[in-house]
Amino acid sequence: MSWALSLPVKTLKDSSARHVLLCLANYAGSNGAGAFPSAKTLTDDTGLSERTVRIKLDLLEECGLIVPGNQALAAVYIDRHDRRPVVYDLMIKRGAVVAPREDATGCSLGQNGVQPTTERGAATAPNTSINHQLTEQQQREISEVVAEQDRQALEPQDDRQRFPMFAEFVPSPEALQAQLKIAGLPEDCATDDLIARFKGFFVAKTAVVDSAAGWCFKLAGWIKRERALGSTSTEEELPAGDWASKGVRL
């Protein structure tokens, strides 16, 4: 917070934005990183409206005084993605003020004898924060855990779990081969193009859910239909009875 207090007026002339910055700094770590109070919290702290707080945060970003930080920090404390506030880092180095030096009498040239910043890159005094600041190593570990959790969320936990189709879905080779065999199809007929078209069709149908094995069953049926349609597209028109033999419904 001492950094925010020591910013020259010419660096940030907007008094409301300065007030938001001061309150935001109260939640940052000693290096200015990892502040993530919600807009509602900043509204309570500053007395400004939530809309004004958001506008002033945008202004602080435009001025280069804050930047988006490690968003995984908020995920540690808040499970729901849509309720996580933005994590900001304060650009302390950008807005740093040269520390006052003592004159010949040994008196500090700073206001009221208070030195707002430290010299030669020394660490600033730590600020208390409700964010429970972590070391950089811990932050990296948390980021890896969150990324792994997001990856696992896209994958079915077992064959019985039902889920909507998603772009990263990879059918089980064993289950798919079994369904192809049951459908009387060759093992090599499940081409990448057919699988991609199948997934593209069902990704848009979020209401359709099935298990991993069920999706393999649907995929085998899709391939059989596509092959039947493809084999008859270049032939002459067939009698109705022969269409049924091709597996195509009229």
Image (cartoon, grey):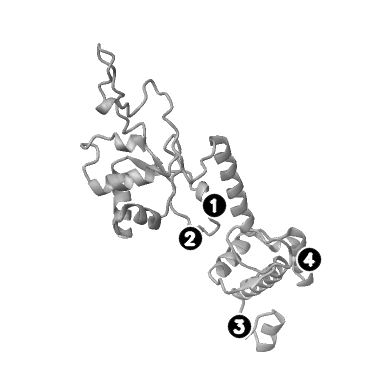
Instruction: Name the image quarter holding residue 88.
Output: top left
Against 217, is 49 above or below? above
- Residue 210 picture location, percent across and down: 67, 71
Dot in front, 2 or 4: 2
Look at label 1 and name its amino acid. Tyr
Corner quadrant of residue 170? bottom right
At a point 55% along the width and 65% down the height, the residue shown is: 200
The secondary structure type at the circle numbered 3 is loop
**Label ID, residue 178:** 4
Of badges 1 and 4, the one in the foreground is 1
Q: Nearer the viewer, residue 110 or 92?
A: 110
Q: Earlier in the sequence, mark 4 or mark 3?
A: 4
User: Split into 4 quadrants, where in the image is the C terminus?
Assistant: bottom right
Residue 26: x and y in percent read: 40, 43
Of the numbered discs 3 and 2, the one sitting upstream in the chain is: 2
Q: CA distance from mark 4 to mark 3?
A: 33 Å
Q: Nearer the viewer, mark 3 or mark 2?
A: 2
